[in-house]
Amino acid sequence: MNDEIISVIDAARNLDRHKAYIFKILGRLCIDTVKEKNSAARGQKIAYITIDDYKRVKDYLSKTEGDQTFLAQQSDVRGVSYLIQLEPEHDPGRFKLGFATNIEERLRSHKTAAPFSKVLKVWPCKILWEKTAIECASQGCTRLHTEVFRTESINEVQPRCEQFFKIMPQLDSNN
């Protein structure tokens, strides 16, 4: 391994951000990662970016996170919040909660990793509600990954989602 790359894990640590957030920024900036096996990770492949790309991410964060214009633009981004059961037959308690501006495209990308997944419900949503909706709906569940959880009963999760979106402002094409 040369000195011209940095793992996404280290980049996230250096920038004091979650790894998943850094991956979202990499996607926004169209930055590709390279995966290489790492002995420190028990031989598993780790994602790396170039030092130049790391600097781009750092610059992006410094420009956007303090920029009120950026925050104002983000506050009006709309799409849907979704509840997906990832393995209905083999692991019915494992589910994913998330947000998408294009639900069809998002579901297509999920099908590559979880081909048997089943969409249980979608709700109109603003992007600023995403984290709160996830925290509300996942109460009492075990977090397996950023937006993936396990529950004893999936039938308890959807009603929590319904309750959350019932108290939020109703979104329509005019809002």
Image (tube, grey):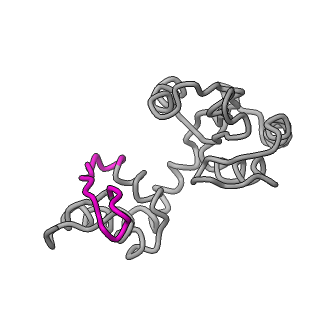
Q: Name the spot of residue 70 as percent of width and height, x first.
A: 46, 55
Residue pictured at 46% horizontal, 65% vertical: 65
Q: Decide whether residue 119 is among the magenta residues.
A: no
Q: Name the spot of residue 121 as percent of width and height, x first.
A: 71, 27
Q: Nearer the viewer, residue 53 or 85?
A: 85
Residue pictured at 61% horizontal, 42% vertical: 98
Left/right placement of residue 148 relative to residue 37 reads: right
Q: Nearer the viewer, residue 108 or 35?
A: 35
Left/right placement of residue 63 relative to residue 113 reads: left
Left/right placement of residue 119 relative to residue 21 reads: right
Q: Name the spot of residue 4 as percent of width and height, x first.
A: 15, 69
Q: Nearer the viewer, residue 37 or 131?
A: 37
Q: Is residue 110 above or below residue 69?
A: above
Q: Nearer the viewer, residue 38 or 57?
A: 38
Q: Where the C terminus falls, by quadrant? A: top right
Residue pictured at 51% horizontal, 23% vertical: 104
Left/right placement of residue 24 relative to residue 29 reads: right
Q: Quadrant of residue 155?
A: top right
Q: Where the N terminus falls, by quadrant? A: bottom left
Q: Decide whether residue 32 is among the magenta residues.
A: yes
Q: Is residue 70 above or below residue 96?
A: below
Q: Name the spot of residue 17 as percent of width and height, x first.
A: 47, 68
Q: Is residue 39 above or below residue 126?
A: below
Q: Is residue 168 above or below residue 141?
A: above
Magenta residues span 27-45
Q: Quadrant of residue 13?
A: bottom left
